[in-house]
Image (cartoon, rainbow, N blue to C red):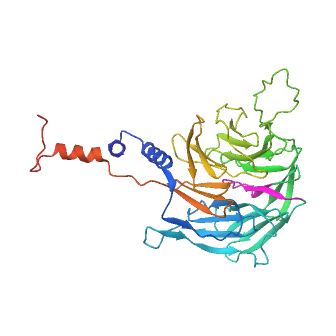
Amino acid sequence: MLGFLTARQSGLDDPLRMRRAESTRRVLSLTLDPDRDVDRIHGNGINTIDIEAVEGRYMLSGGADGVIVIYDLENYSGKLQYTCKAVCTVGRSSRHVHKFSVETVQWYPFDTGMFVSSSFDKTMKVWDTETLKPAEVFQFEGNVYSHHLSPIARKHSLVAVGTNNPKIQLCDLKSGSRIHVLQGHRAEVLSVRWSPRYEHILATASADSKVNVWDVRRASGSLFTLDQHNGEKSKASAEAVNTAHNGRVNGLCFTSDGLYLLTTGTDDRMRLWNSASGENTLVNYGKVCNESRKKLQFAVSRGCSPDFVFVPCGSSVAVYALHTGELVTMLRGHYNNVDCCEFHQDHQELYSGGKDSNILAWVPVLRTADVEDELGCEASVGPHGHTGHPS
């Protein structure tokens, strides 16, 4: 660490190099925080969590009980041990509460005054954070598995919505109406994600084993469909369509720079794709356990070198090196299956929610004093403060 600081101070290194090195060290040392609890509000499993990007202070959670909770993650107690308090709740007693399981919650990317939730009660609600009342309610014909707002869009205010209808719905927050439908899947759409690099690029994953990438400005179908074989199917294969997985595709996540797209499927595989060309990079992550019939919320680190992927795997969270596929560690602490995890990029922390109704905080181990450097300093300074010379 001192070497990085000296190199940065003298101008030998880019400051970003030290930041990446320390971020990587922190992620590699993640452990369950014994001093931090998160208020236990949900009566059933937690399906989805989201941390707002404006301050990095507030976290949303949505549960199988239909309840939505907002937590304050900051510690103002002045004590080491503290609880992340629930500052407000849309509970069962509220007339605006979702009737069935909440599948996705997401903050509006540019302002914490608004968030969006979607549910198996066939609705997507746009909430005013101050009043905890819906400013808009979108009704759909079937269960809503996933929705997503673009983290970067300035030219549109579209929410992509995946339901048990194969058609992807695009809803406009400004007009409050459904303005467009994307057709290309043959089964329910389990996950949708906008690119963090190009505001009109959208990826969608379906139970038909396909992942489509769209430019929503185009009226004529998807840009391409991801093919796990990169166009080199064996002659014995009779498949006529490109498939990303050999099972339901229930998870999508772009890397923070938008250059790569990760997908997970019920074939117990995770794949890394070049998001511009659609090429399968063929990184082998081994068996990635995935029995979820619904959307799987996993996360990718940001600002590390290399970056890491955090994937719910049974009652643990598996941590993989993004580009090598190496299983780095398993984070164990939940008593039941983990359904979602979210990376806090400001502090290199991870939050995970599970069927045990708990949200757990995984934090970096604090750096201990560098013993070697201390010994080195003592050796170089004599008993009277003079610099000593080796004999």
Look at 89% across and 44% down and name the residue there: 186
- The magenta stretch spans residue 105: no
Look at 73% across and 34% down and name the residue there: 278
In percent of width and height, residue 75 lies at 49, 69
Looking at the picture, tell me which residue is in the foreground, 350 or 11: 350
Give the number of callouts: 0
Residue 102 position by quadrant: bottom right
Q: As drawn, which residue projects farthest toward the front?
A: 335
Q: Is residue 203 visible?
A: no
Looking at the picture, tell me which residue is in the foreground, 26 or 362: 362
Is the residue 61 above or below the residue 254 in the image? below
Q: As drawn, which residue projects farthest toward the top?
A: 235
Is the residue 385 above or below the residue 357 in the image? above
Look at 68% across and 54% down and name the residue there: 337
In percent of width and height, residue 225 lies at 80, 37
Please state the extent of the stretch shown in magenta in the rendering: 142-161
Say left or right for 127 vs 320: right
Quadrant position of the N terminus in the picture: top left
In percent of width and height, residue 281 lies at 67, 31
- The magenta stretch spans residue 155: yes
